Image (cartoon, rainbow, N blue to C red):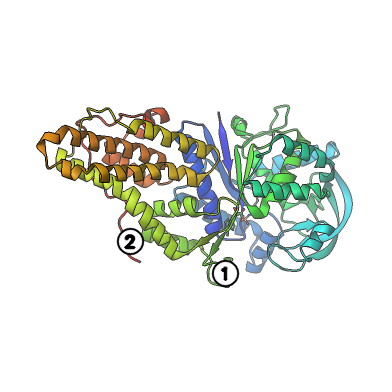
Amino acid sequence: MPACITTPIYYVNDRPHIGHAYTTTVCDVWARAMRLRGEDVFFLTGTDEHGVKVEKSAAARGIPPKQLADENAAEFKRVLSVFGLTNDDFIRTTEPRHELQVQHFVKRLLESGDVYLGTFEGWYDEGQEEYYTDTRAKELDYKSPISGKPLVRATEENYYFRLSSFQERLQAFYEANPGFVQPAARQNEVLGRLRGGLQDVPMTRTNFTWGIPFPGDERHVIYVWIDALFNYVTALGVGDPDGSAAPGLHAERAKYWPAQYHVIGKEILWFHAVIWPALLMALGLPMPRRIHAHSFWIADGQKMSKSMGNFVDLATIEGYIGSYGLDAWRWYMATQGPLQASDADFRAQHFHDTYTSELVNVVGNCPSRVTAMIGKYFDGKMPEDAQQGGEWPARCASAVADWTRAIDELDLVAAANAPMSLLRDIDAFINRTEPFKVAKDPARREELASILSQCAEAVRIAGVLLSPFLPAKMGELDAALAQPGAAGTTFAARTAWGVLTPGAALAKCALFPRVER
Ligand code: MSP
């Protein structure tokens, strides 16, 4: 079945940093894992280019907003390619394919009465470009929950989206789809707020011009959040429910909608869990399957901030990649990150210790031990196993099953743990069976061959399951195990027992060198 995963589209008034790298890496690991399983995957990311923040940042530099957007979108694209991220498209909200389709959707919402012209007064968070209800503003002590700056009282004549009329439908939808938002703690927050009632949301702005013109009333530009949410469908060429799509759209991609996962940070959950589903309901389009809202990276125990000097920016990330390698960076992101309900602390020592204890001591060491012994005792040729795998085919099959279940749930920690625990079991098996001692007794040659052959095959399967996390290094492992064309075969074939043929030449491999700190 076609499967789509999306990142938020990133604001172009900022340069790429760990937050962007994190969400994109999570999606990349999932997309690679699904492709490995033979699924037809579409991985979407891009940039959010309109709105007052971008207009102001550009003005501060004395350049047109489009120029700022072009520069920073190019930087985001460059980073994606340097980091080997495998997105299938990069949508920019200033592209005609997006703008035209957004105007088309908004027109339809006007026609259906879901959008109307009205006056509004409320508590506004300037940094977030978001209004809060009176109750919510009071709860927040009239301060932005993100920046801490005071909320301001603002009045506007605007077009509104009739969000209030979707409360019951949204509640019914949540009842029918209990795992829609994950983790569960985040879904409970949404449901709590939803029960508190919904207000109509402004769809347009008149106080600046850097946005998509509102169809039929060009004094207004479309509110950046509404514009941005639509990227998920405009990039996929999703048209109207009757199947029609604007010319120039990628109609052939519509099969990827609904997305399997929208992966986002927790600070933008309300837009994705309430406003976005309501917009889709109003347009008669299918709902995404799941929204995964991860938590935040903090650094050295504190919120990251540029002024504190603990901000993990692009230069810092590139420093880690330079010292430890790109795969090590991916590993830390995917296995130590804030994917569930708690924030994760980024610390240099922790990065180093994770690298050493997991990548050097397990993922590097186990294949190195096995291939070195095969080199020494069998002249580098895969030995023959008279026991046909012994306990290992079943052990590997259970690792594959655990991994598959975890990928379905976007549980990257559990997915990484399946092959890791397999490698640890192989190490324990080596320690227990002591092939280095068995090798001293020529009468136990057959036993030695079985032990090492089983280890090599199990290592190979662990490598397949690790490959979405560590693509370059697991490519090296495949090469060492004489599996150069492995990527072209099916997942079932790659994870089946008995792929390494007796007599095949295996090379010694040293995947993760120790790094001094
Ligand atoms: N443009 C909006 C999203 C529109 S989606 C239709 C936006 N952009 S953003 O550039 O601010 O990126 C926000 C995303 O960056 C968050 O949702 C999250 O994915 C990521 N992160 C930003 N800082 C982060 C951390 N410190 N830690 C982890 N991820 C965070 O919001």
Q: Nearer the viewer, residue 405 or 482?
A: 405
Quarter assignment of residue 65: bottom right
Near mark 1 (Cα within 10 A), the count class, few <14, some 14-19 or many ≥20, is few
Could you say where residue 281 lies in the image, as x and y percent from the top left?
76, 36
Badge 2 is on which residue?
515
Q: Nearer the viewer, residue 474 or 178?
A: 178
Q: CA distance from mark 2 to mark 1?
A: 28 Å
**Which quadrant would the N terminus be assigned to in this image?**
top right
Whether the residue under disc 2 has CB within 8 Å of ligand 1 = no
The residue under the point 86% across, 39% down is 113
The residue under the point 32% across, 65% down is 516
* Residue type at tag 1: Lys
**Mark number, residue 306:** 1
Could you say where residue 133 lies in the image, as x and y percent from the top left?
82, 56
- Residue 76 visible in the shown view: no
**Mark number, residue 97:** none
Could you say where residue 38 lies in the image, as x and y percent from the top left?
46, 31
